[in-house]
Image (spheres, rainbow, N blue to C red):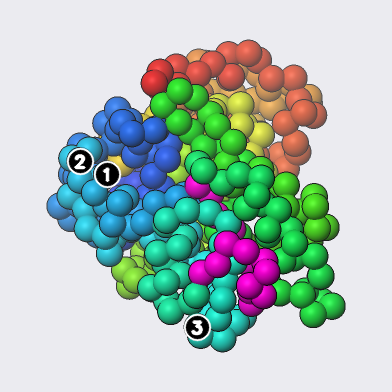
Amino acid sequence: MGLFSRAASAVMPLDGVDTILADLDGVVYAGPGALPHAVESLNRARATTRIGYITNNAARTDVTVADHLTELGLQTTPDEIVTSPQAAVRLLRTTVADGSTILVVGGEGLVVELEKAGYTVTRSSDDNPNAVVQGFAPNVDWSQLAEAAYALAVPEAEGGIPWIATNTDWTIPQARGTAPGNGTLVSAVHTAVGRLATVAGKPEKPIFDVAVDRFAAKKALFIGDRLDTDIAGAQSAGIDSVLVLTGIDRPKHVLAAPSHAHPTYILPDLRGLFEPYPVTTVKDDVVSVRGASVRVEGTDIRILSEGDQIDLLRAAAHAIWATGRQIFGFRVPEKLYEDPFLVRR
């Protein structure tokens, strides 16, 4: 599905789309504040297209998230919020009996979803839980991680209990910068017990399955800021994707993206949803996007014409990805790594 897989005529990213599925951190907001152009663009899209918000952040409930989005100016209801705890509950139903006792590492967002589903929540391995579910919350500490390790000491193949992680994002964009995410906490437990968790959130399919089913999406478009979770997850779910350069991943990450994480579109911000997406052309090994042109010459990436920086990035990405080779095998001009898209928070 990757970038530039469309027909050779300019289309807008929203053409034919009946459902937008948007990430939150790094797409709509960073910390408590909205990112530039996000709110007005999504409200404009909502006039003609159903919108659902998908978040790996397990700390907050769908009601809390919807309230926050409403405060930012988005027209949103709780049923339009798909959370990784909701996806974890979907997985849990396939592994343990209804009403089972679940040891929780995490906060309110996870506890509320488990209790809504009829599970009994505990914080202690002494209560003989039937599974461990782990999600991020700012107050997760050593004692919670230790309880999970105690409960997971026996491998599942030897009769141990299941372990579900809401997500394994290594980082979270915050107003002050980039902070450790749930992946670091899951890794701490993994290091202690030598087991791997089953993951419910992006990039795994359960959270996309919940979203597609809830909105009855026939042709969805996913918007994210991370290649490893958002774009890879959308691609594995068979959904077209937008990488928006307002969050974690930067131009250097785009150029190095593996084949399973190639976005359909690359946008500086969400205003690009309503603009014709430029056609990429290839002639005599020259890859061009509007006024930007590049060519791969052995191990060199040669810039023939700079054009706009976003078009130069699109052209270079296409050229590099088409080789099937990894970025460290090339000499890359510093110009391709320039980042005028970075949002100063």
Magenta segment boundaries in residue numbering: 121-137
Q: Which x, y percent locates residue 103?
A: 59, 66
Q: Is residue 280 left or right of residue 212?
A: right
Label 1 to label 2: alpha-carbon separation: 5 Å
Which is more N-terminal, label 3 or label 1?
Answer: 1
Q: Which x, y percent locates residue 123?
A: 57, 62
Please say whether residue 272 is one of the residues in the magenta stretch: no
Q: Which mark is residue 68?
A: 1
Label 1 to label 3: alpha-carbon separation: 31 Å
Q: Residue at x 27, y 52 (%)?
A: 66
Q: Which mark is residue 99?
A: 3
Q: Are marks 1 and 2 in contact (CB under 8 Å)?
A: yes
Residue corresponding to mark 2: 71
Badge 1 element:
helix
From what the image shows, is residue 108 above or below residue 154? above
Q: Nearer the viewer, mark 1 or mark 3?
A: 3
Amino acid type, callout 3: Gly
